Structures are given as structure tokens and as C-alpha cells.
Amino acid sequence: MTQNHQTSPGMRVVSPDQWGPDLGLVAGGTWREIIGPGTGARCRSLYAIDLGPGAATRALAHPGEAVYYVVGGTVTVTEQLAGGRAAGHELAEGAMAHLRAGSLYTLAAEAGARLVGGPSPVDPALGTAPAEPPAEPGVTTYHRDRPGLLVPFISADARLVVWLGAGAVTANMNYVVLEPGERNREHVHAESEDTIHILAGHGTAENVTTGEKFRFGPGDTIHIEIGYWHAVAADQGERVVSVGGPCPADTDMLRAAGVDVDALPLTGATR
């Protein structure tokens, strides 16, 4: 974990001591902003959600998509549907949940759990009265060990799990492992903000556009604004593990990885 604020034009590294205050969205836990409206982000929000034993969030709904990653424990995502129906999804560590726009849901944990994620794009009215329940289910679950696509120029083990090929247009979640000495190929997202939450390991975040470099550690989050060249290096002799990625989906990156983007569903606004 970093110990001081690190920022440059286009990049910042946010450590846990810089997270925002509890937003009061969890009975028996906390919901704190890492990246979101308070940091000027527009395309992705990332919150640290700590569910104590028996904790549950209030009912939530967003005008756009949302995505979550289970850092530890077991979480139940319950979506409310029209006609008084409900559907529950149990997610263990390493699982991810993608929610379509308008999904009405709660997060709960019997024995406690930790998650990172949130609505993408940012929901300025997060926590306000939810919308009417939708008629159709909107929650899809995934796991880091069942990726939809591998992207070798990000790392030898860069897994796109919740991605455009699975129908996630604006709320994506990747799982990336950098072995000691490994470094991303320098890259840029022309229309996406990139957010990288460090689960394990120490390394260096490089703002290639400005030439600045920042150290990071477990619990830190790297946020890169649209249009800034950057790279992440596991240059401290440790394996670096992270979740996050560009939001909205970066179609140029997907094409560079050999994906026929025009053949994917839900790409009309992003081609």
C-alpha cells in the first residue's frame, strides 16, 4: 500500500487511507468510494464494499450497467423483478457479477464479505430511491478462472471476464496477473478510463505520456484518464494481481487482440 497521495496529469494512485467516507448504503458494513464522482471519474466508479456478518445493502438501481468482484467471503446478489419475483445469485471469492441497466438488487453476506465495484458509468444519484423492478432478470455471474478472452499484450495471464463479448458495454471487469519482471506493453485508451485495483504485489505504475512513475502495493488503485499512455510493471520482485480495466469497452484494444468487434452483440454505440 502506498503511504502518500500520488498524482500526475492523467494518472493517480489512490491508497486505502484516501478512500472516501462511508456512504451509508450498508446495514452492518461500509460502502466507500475509491474512484467515482468525488475523484472526477465519469466512465467507471469503483467502491470498497465491506459486508459484516449478516450485513446487507439497501436496494440499488442505476441508469447504466454495474459490475462487482468478490475479494473475499461469499456474497448473495438478489435481484427484485416485476410481480414480486426475486432471483438470488451466490458468489464466492473470485466471482464477478454484471448487472444490466435498471436492475434492482441488494448485496448481502451471512458470514461477511468484501467486494470492489460499482456502476459504470458513474451514477451521481447512487443510493437514491430505486426504480420499479424490471420484468426480465439482469444479473449475470462470472468467475476469474473462466475468462472470455486472453489479451497477451497486457500480460501472459490477462483475462477479460466481464467484457464486450459477454454483452458488457460500459461495465467491464478483467483479472490480470503480472509475474515478477513482467510489464504491460505501453498502451492508451482513446475513449475509456482505466481503473486497476491491486489485490496483491508491489510494482510501478507508469504514466508514459508525462514520464512519471508511481509505486503501488496491495489495496492501491491506479486510475488513468482517457487518452493517457500508460503501463504497469511488476518490477519489485513480486507477482502483481489486479482487477479492473477500461470502461467503456475499448474496441481498439479488442481489435488489436484479434476480436471481430463488429460481430459482437451490443456494440452499436461503441464501434
Image: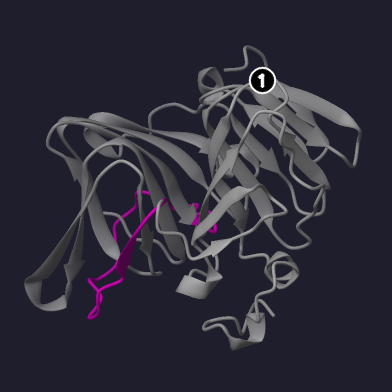
Q: Amino acid at mark 1?
A: Gly
Q: Residues within 10 Å of mark 1 (few under 14, many from 20)?
A: few
Q: Is residue 146 left or right of residue 83?
A: right
Q: Is residue 139 above or below residue 78?
A: below
Q: Magenta region: which residues?
A: 120-144
Residue occupying the point 44% across, 46% down:
117
Residue occupying the point 62% across, 53% down:
42
Q: Is residue 6 left or right of residue 228?
A: left
In which image quadrant can residue 89 be found? bottom left
Which residue in the protein does label 1 denote?
237
Q: Which of 132 and 229 lies nearest the eye of the viewer?
A: 229
Q: Is residue 157 above or below residue 199?
A: below
Residue occupying the point 66% across, 47% down:
155
- Residue 173, given in percent of the width and then of the height, sits at 50, 54
Residue occupying the point 12% across, 66% down:
86
Q: Is residue 271 above or below residue 190?
A: below
In magenta stretch: residue 132: yes
In magenta stretch: residue 23: no
